[in-house]
Image: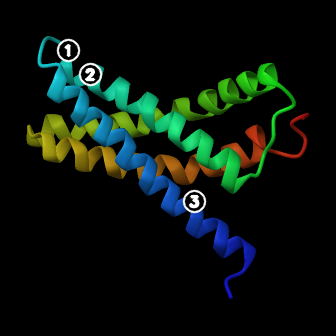
C-alpha cells in the first residue's frame, strides 16, 4: 500500500501528464483552425490557458483538497495560482520556443514544451503547496 506522499506524487504526475496533453492538444487544435500571422505564439497562449485551467481544477480538488469560501475567494485563489505559474511558464516557453528555434519543427516544439512543462510542474508543486493552497491561506 503506497504512503500518502507516494499517492500524492503519483496523482500529481498523472495530472501533470493530463495537463501537458491538454496544453499541447489545445495548441494543435488551435493551429488546425488558425493558420495566419502569429499562429504559433497565439496557439501557445491558448494551450497555456487550457493547461492552466485543467491543472488548477485537478490540483485544487485532488492534490490539495482545497475548498473556497465563495466565488470571490475562488477567483483570488486562481489569481494567486496563476501568479505562481509565471516563472514556471517562462521555463516552459523557453524550452518550447528554444526547441522550435533549434530544430525548426512542430514535433521538436512540442517535445520542448513537454520538457519545459515537466520542469515547471515540479517547481510549481512546492510554490502551490507553500503559497496557494497552504493551511495559512485563509478559507
Please give left or right for residue 11 compared with residue 101 in the image: right
Q: Quadrant of the C terminus?
A: top right
Residue topped by disc 3: 12
Please give left or right for residue 17 compared with residue 63 in the image: left
The answer to whether 130 is drawn above or below residue 87 in the figure is: below
- Disc 3 crowd, CA 10 A, few/some/many (<14, 14-19, 20+): many
Question: Is there any visible trace of residue 8 in the rendered image?
Answer: yes
Residue topped by disc 1: 38
Q: Would you identify the image quadrant in which residue 69 lies?
A: top right
How many labels sit on residues?
3
Question: Which of the pair 137/32 is nearer the observer?
Answer: 32
Question: Which of the pair 30/135 is nearer the observer?
Answer: 30
The answer to whether 130 is drawn above or below residue 139 in the figure is: below
What residue sits 51% from the left and 35% below the top? Answer: 52
Contact? badges 3 and 1 (CB < 8 Å) = no
Please give left or right for residue 87 compared with residue 108 in the image: right
Disc ID at residue 30: none
- Disc 2 crowd, CA 10 A, few/some/many (<14, 14-19, 20+): few
x and y percentages locating residue 42 in the rendered image: 28, 19
Contact? badges 2 and 1 (CB < 8 Å) = yes
**Element under label 2?**
helix
Ranked by sequence position, the earlier of labels 2 and 3 is 3
**Element under label 3?**
helix
What residue sits 49% from the left and 62% below the top? Answer: 14
Q: Quadrant of the N terminus?
A: bottom right
**Element under label 1?**
loop
Q: Would you identify the image quadrant in which residue 62 lies?
A: bottom right
Question: Is there any visible trace of residue 97 in the rendered image?
Answer: no
What residue sits 56% from the left and 34% below the top? Answer: 85
Residue topped by disc 2: 41
x and y percentages locating residue 126 in the rendered image: 67, 51
Amino acid at each position: 500500500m503506497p504512503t500518502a506522499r507516494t499517492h500524492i506524487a503519483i496523482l500529481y504526475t498523472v495530472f501533470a501528464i493530463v495537463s501537458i496533453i491538454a496544453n499541447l492538444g489545445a495548441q494543435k487544435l488551435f493551429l488546425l483552425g488558425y493558420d495566419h500571422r502569429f499562429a504559433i505564439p497565439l496557439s501557445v497562449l491558448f494551450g497555456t490557458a487550457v493547461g492552466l485551467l485543467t491543472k488548477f481544477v485537478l490540483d485544487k480538488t485532488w492534490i490539495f483538497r482545497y475548498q473556497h469560501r465563495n466565488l470571490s475567494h475562488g477567483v483570488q485563489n486562481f489569481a494567486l495560482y496563476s501568479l505562481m505559474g509565471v516563472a514556471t511558464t517562462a521555463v516552459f516557453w523557453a524550452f518550447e520556443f528554444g526547441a522550435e528555434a533549434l530544430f525548426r519543427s512542430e514535433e521538436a516544439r512540442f517535445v520542448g514544451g513537454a520538457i519545459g512543462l515537466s520542469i515547471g510542474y515540479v517547481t510549481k508543486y512546492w510554490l502551490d503547496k507553500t503559497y496557494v493552497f497552504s493551511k495559512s491561506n485563509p478559507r
